[in-house]
Image: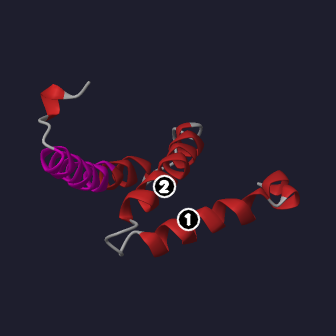
């Protein structure tokens, strides 16, 4: 952990967490918040995976991220479907 503090890596890491936390509650930018949290989650799971004897909240956080991703993804697919139907195309007719 000393190297992380000395290199100031944690400042960027915490900034990404705060930015994603600010974006998640707002509906228009929730997709961006979920996208920002994906590499943060990978970092958390990697860090806790290296410490197998320690109890961690990594799998629980991963489950929460998956639930949020499914909610966001269904909304994005719904918007794409509406846009395609407004353009007179069905999802199978794209070319």
Q: For this rendering, which residue is in front, 41 or 81?
A: 81
The magenta region covers 66-87
Tell me if 86 is positioned left or right of 20 in this view. Answer: left
Using the image, determine if residue 58 lies above or below residue 15.
Answer: above
**Is 23 or 76 nearer to us in this picture?**
76
The residue labelled by disc 1 is: 17
Quarter holding the N terminus?
bottom right
Q: Which residue is mark 2?
A: 37
Mark 1, residues whose alpha carbon is within 10 Å: few (<14), some, or many (≥20)?
Answer: some
Check the image and name the residue furthest to the right: 6
Residue 33 location, x and y as percent? 45, 61
Q: Position of residue 54 (x, y in %)?
A: 52, 48
Magenta-span inclusion, residue 76: yes
Tell me the CA gap for discs 1 and 2.
7 Å
* Left or right: 51 as drawn, with respect to 65: right
Q: Quadrant of residue 48?
A: top right
- The extreme front residue here reads 88
Q: Residue at x 86, y 56 (%)?
A: 7
Percent x, y of residue 91: 15, 33
Residue 74 falls inside the magenta stretch: yes
Q: Secondary structure at mark 2?
A: helix
Q: Which mark is residue 35?
A: none
Type of secondary structure dominating the magenta stretch:
helix
Q: Find residue 89 and report its image quarter.
A: top left
Of the numbered discs 1 and 2, the one sitting upstream in the chain is: 1
Circle 1: element type: helix
């Amino acid at each position: 952990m000393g190297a992380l503090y000395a290199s100031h890596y944690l400042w960027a890491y915490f900034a990404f967490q705060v930015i994603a936390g600010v974006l998640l509650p707002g509906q228009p930018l929730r997709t961006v918040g979920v996208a920002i949290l994906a590499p943060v989650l990978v970092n958390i799971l990697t860090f806790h995976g290296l410490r197998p004897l320690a109890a961690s909240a990594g799998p629980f956080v991963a489950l929460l991220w998956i639930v949020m991703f499914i909610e966001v993804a269904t909304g994005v697919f719904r918007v794409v479907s509406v846009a395609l139907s407004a353009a007179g195309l069905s999802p199978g007719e794209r070319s």
